[in-house]
Amino acid sequence: MVPPIPEDRLGRPLRKLRLSVTDRCNFRCRYCMPETEYSWLPRAALLEFEELRRIAAVFLRVGVSEIRLTGGEPLLRRDLPVLVRMLSGLEGLRDLAMTTNGARLPELAGELARAGLRRVTISLDSLDPERFRRITQKDVLPEVLEGVEAARRAGFAEVKLNCVVMRGINDDEIPDLLDFALEWGLEPRFIEYMDVGGATRWDGAEVFPKEEILARITKRFGPPRPLEGRGSAPAQRYRLPNGAVFGLIASTTAPFCRGCDRSRLSADGHWFHCLYAATGIDLRGLLRGGAEDGILEERIRGAWGERRDRGAEDRFGLADRRPLLDAAAMRAHPHLEMHKRGG
Ligand code: SAM
Ligand code: SF4
Ligand code: SF4
């Protein structure tokens, strides 16, 4: 008999896994990597493709059915289509997706789709080249737009856009970004600026909350109606009077931890139960120490059964909210960086 999908202490099943395939990134988004210097994982520490395939297969046996590749910037991992092909054929996998900054999609989108990648989410925070450069510290808006076009042509089952909204930085672009996405037939998702590990310059005053995002959208498109059936998804989806759909991820002002069925594996094989979790479990150590799949499976089931994380809700409850880590603390705890554990 197949053992049941493990549930954590709050009754949340383990269904989704985000696999960080690299901690490297070719952007320096001000909400994610605002510092000038970072420490990088040594190459030998990164999980090799065969290790990633094996760990993914164990998670699928435990009950995970959806895997998302992320990073850092996943398209910087050499031969990524080879990994996608290795993962896409695994038994029990219902969905294989990726979150990317899109700059390398013009060269890679077709190959990734042919290798079995089903869905892609592309980060796009501005349509203005100068503003895009200021946010990402990289002057490549045309390449990213080309990447969006390449993703549309590649035949993925779904292409979405992620936009982190920051007050005074890009909040005035919400309607234009929505228009752009709808014109291109893509679903946009607006994300509140979060005080995650990498966001060392986070400032509550720069958070542009859900209500204000909705107000901006209402002004241009009329009142959006929330869609039923959110399930465990981080985004609440809305339908506009014109029929178009968009998503809103309000993790800062309206966290949704009670439905969270996700966990993350860093590029060096540390398994984290929450975006904010201080510690993870070293699955690479177990793997390289010679543990059989059955041992890994047992460890994963046991650890998930003990999970109590509600990171964003805990942060919401703080009276005096500051960045999770300042630059010095981040250097002492590099695994807490968003780009290391996988956003
Ligand atoms: N490099 C890829 C990208 O940018 O799409 C994948 C990794 S990135 C860490 C994943 C997602 O996290 C992106 O959509 C990014 O916008 C989001 N993100 C990073 N820092 C954030 C923050 N402080 N608040 C909200 N979202 C953030
Ligand atoms: Fe930006 Fe993604 Fe790189 Fe972070 S990992 S700096 S969000 S492109
Ligand atoms: Fe899940 Fe942690 Fe995010 Fe809450 S903060 S939704 S528990 S990953």
Image: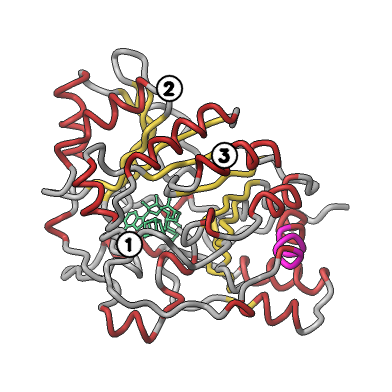
Would residue 142 be counted in the magenta stretch? no
Q: Magenta region, mostly helix, strand or loop?
A: helix
SS assignment at label 2: loop
Whether the residue under disc 1 has CB within 8 Å of ligand 2? yes
Labels 2, 1: front one = 1
- Residue at 43%, 42% in the rendered image: 122
Residue 55 is a magenta residue? yes
Q: Secondary structure at mark 3?
A: helix
* Segment colored magenta: 50-56
Which quadrant holds the C terminus?
A: bottom left
Label 2–label 1 contact, CB within 8 A: no
Q: In terms of sequence position, does the residue under pointer 3 or pointer 1 come before the other?
A: 1
Q: Position of residue 289 (x, y in %)?
A: 77, 84
Relative horizontal placement of residue 141, taking residue 72 as reference (left or right): left
Display colour scheme: secondary structure
The residue under label 2 is 185
**Residue pointed to by mark 3:** 109
Q: Dot 1 corresponds to which residue?
A: 28
**Disc 2 residue type?**
Gly
